Amino acid sequence: MNRRRLVGIYVWHGKAYLPVQARLESGMWMDLEPVYIADLNTKDLLLAIEKVLAAGHPRLPDPTREEMRQRKDPILKATKAHSWKELARTGAAYSISWTGEEITVYMSRLDKKGRWEYDPEKTRAFPPETPLEEIVAVILEDIRSRSEVWQ
């Protein structure tokens, strides 16, 4: 049985931020520390992705409302952004998902309220044996096409 793996990549102010991803009892995902920071080039992004994958996906109980209220989000902490809306306005989000059948790359766009959502027109699926370098190249190409992100 193949386990699903996931890497989230948040791009802001010329850097990529990649948190470790925990799997909650409910099946949801949550960003955790450490957050690896990479320059926007193939070598540094590959190294950061490999670190996130090596960390695995800790299994955690669902946090209580109080725990969520007191929690300092690791991405906001790492980027020093004041809010997710600030990140979304001048940044981008990507997700790489590995299943037994394929590797999928999701790329963000802004919704009507100025928040990130994944753009179904940009979603890319790759065969499971696709080299990570090829996937990173697709992400970097999208980053470079976004004037608000590529600074």
Image (cartoon, rainbow, N blue to C red):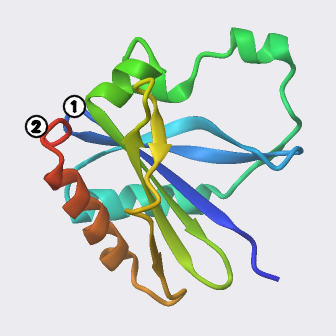
Query: Going by the image, does 134 lie left or right of 147?
Result: right
Which residue was labeled with disc 2? 151
Residue at image location 44% in from the left, 15% down from the top:
83
Q: Nearer the viewer, residue 96 or 20?
A: 96
Dot 1 falls on a residue whose secondary structure is loop
The disc labelled 2 sits on which kind of residue? Gln
Q: Residue 63 got which mark? A: none
Mark 1, residue position: 13
The residue sitting at 66% across, 58% down in the picture is 56
How far across and how far down the image is residue 104, in percent?
Answer: 51, 70
Location of residue 1 (image quadrant) = bottom right
Q: Is residue 98 visible?
A: yes
C-alpha separation, residue under disc 2 versus residue under disc 1: 7 Å
Left or right: 46 in relation to 125: left
Q: Check if mark 2's residue and mark 1's residue have beta carbons within 8 Å.
A: yes
Answer with mark 2 or mark 1, whichever residue precedes in sequence.
Answer: 1
Neighbour tally class for label 1: few under 14, some 14-19, many 20 plus, Cα within 10 Å: few
At mark 2, the secondary structure is loop
Three-letter amino acid code of the residue under disc 1:
His
Q: Position of residue 35 (x, y in %)?
A: 48, 38
